[in-house]
Amino acid sequence: MFRRILVANRGEIALRIIRACKELGVESVVVYSEADEDALYRRFADETICIGPPPSASSYLDIPRIISAAEVANVDAIHPGYGFLSENSDFADICRSCKIAFIGPSPETIAMVGHKARAKDLARRAEVPVVPGSDGLVDNDEDAVGIAADIGYPVMIKAAAGGGGRGMRIAHSELVLKKEFMAARTESQAAFNDGSLYLEKFIERPRHVEVQILSDHHGNVVHLGERDCSTQRRHQKLIEEAPCPVLTDELRRKMGEAAVRLTRAAEYTNAGTVEFLLDANGDFYFMEMNSRLQVEHPVTEMITGIDLVKEQIRIAAGEPLSFSQEDVEIRGHAIECRINAEDPDRNFRPSPGRVGLYVPPGGPGVRVDSHLFSNYMIPSHYDSMVAKVIVHRATREEAIASMERALSEFVVEGIKTTIPLYHRILRHASFRAADIDTSFVEKLLGS
């Protein structure tokens, strides 16, 4: 086991990793920017190191500063959390060259699965269903028109190096395709320094279902069931639940086996997520593979009893998985709501500022992952997520009721949050009936 781990992140995930380190008897070192000087997680780490001014480019995304901090602190490993450098293959490679363990997959694997076109080719070779589309990258709009004529409209234009909905466009006609193709290329180039695009058949009214995997360095690969992430806005997840309420046991088995095949084909190690689109006919298609811990990992932890962060650390330290696929048991139903410092009534405008009274909810089956506290100043420089409320109950109906109760208890004064939106969603007949798709929130909001 490692002696010291550097946490190269901030917010609730930094605190989450520090807690896992403490329970494993591992010392934690956390880096922070000047904007996070008063951060709660600094109080619980064994050592803290300031790495620069508030802008991410000068702190949490500055690889030389983070590596320097790791060397000064004499750590054995770096945990990147999610976001920031967690899927940066160059960072993972530099860690390796500095003889610092990167808690995640290899740089080669990160680069391969992070490129959507190459990941799709890998899925085909692993006999994992993929959405009909272009055979690799599409060079220009004329080629895109020809491909769309073969697979049929509507089509989805996607950035090969994309994420978070950037570089994605839907086209229902040739005219729109030509226009949106160039717009997607411009956006992708600006966001990822890579204007590569590919085309897929647009699956109408899909559900977004992802499978959690764990894989060690000894050839052991398991999946921990699936999560339904269909409740999202503009490709950003809002509510996640596990298990998916519409999957049959047979479909769950097929989806899990497909995720394991892909993981093996990628020679993937550590924790990862294989994401699928599920259509109304029960057919699923590979979408992408995320080579990191997911924001929504707690719902999987709640229904399996497996601590994913501890498992990440153990795997990176070279330990084999202590359980097999047959040992994984799904118990009950879990739901997570991401609490963002945003104003839903003003087009989700960010709402940074000083928190007044802060009272998190509690009670049976309720978990809150957050770095907030009363009088904390939320910086304006980073992602707006400030907390996650997770509930775990015996049934989905009980979980929805517990979540409503927990959110009604949650007090965060001084800023606007997305809590009122979640009350609307949880009370909606379609959500309660699990009759939703990825467009549900947009329809609810009339946008």
Image (spheres, grey):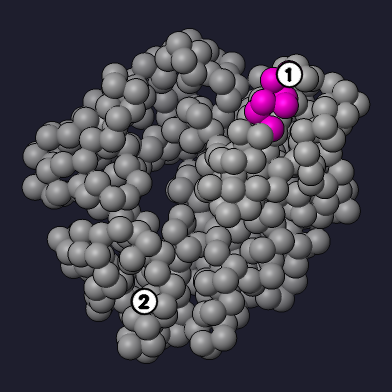
Please, what secondary structure does the residue beneath circle 1 have? helix
Query: How far is mark 2 from mark 1, CA to CA?
Result: 47 Å
Say whether residue 415 is left or right of residue 402.
left
Chief SS of the magenta region: helix
Residue 300 in view (yes/no): no
Q: Which residue was labeled with disc 1? A: 175
Please, what secondary structure does the residue beneath circle 2 have? helix
Residue 264 sits in quarter: bottom right
Viewer-side residue, 292 vs 311: 292
Residue at 56% x, 20% y: name it.
439
- Please say whether residue 121 is one of the residues in the magenta stretch: no
Give the crowd class for mark 2: few <14, some 14-19, many >=20 residues within 10 Å.
Answer: some
Residue at 56% x, 52% y: name it.
192
Task: Tell me the kind of residue under disc 1.
Answer: Leu
Please state the horizontal and vertical placement of residue 2, each as a whole percent of the image: 46, 83
Residue 437 sits in quarter: top right
- Above or below 437: residue 197: below
Instruction: Give the magenta-colored segment's residue range.
Output: 175-181
Q: Which mark is residue 65?
A: 2
Please state the horizontal and vertical placement of residue 207, each as a whole percent of the image: 64, 28
The nearer-to-camera label among 2 and 1 is: 1
Task: Tell me the kind of residue under disc 2.
Answer: Arg
- Above or below 250: residue 24: below
Give the crowd class for mark 1: few <14, some 14-19, many >=20 residues within 10 Å.
Answer: few
Viewer-side residue, 189 vs 388: 189
Viewer-side residue, 261 vs 381: 381
Residue 408 in view (yes/no): yes
Mark 2 or mark 1: name the one nearer the start of the chain.
2
- Above or below 235: residue 45: below
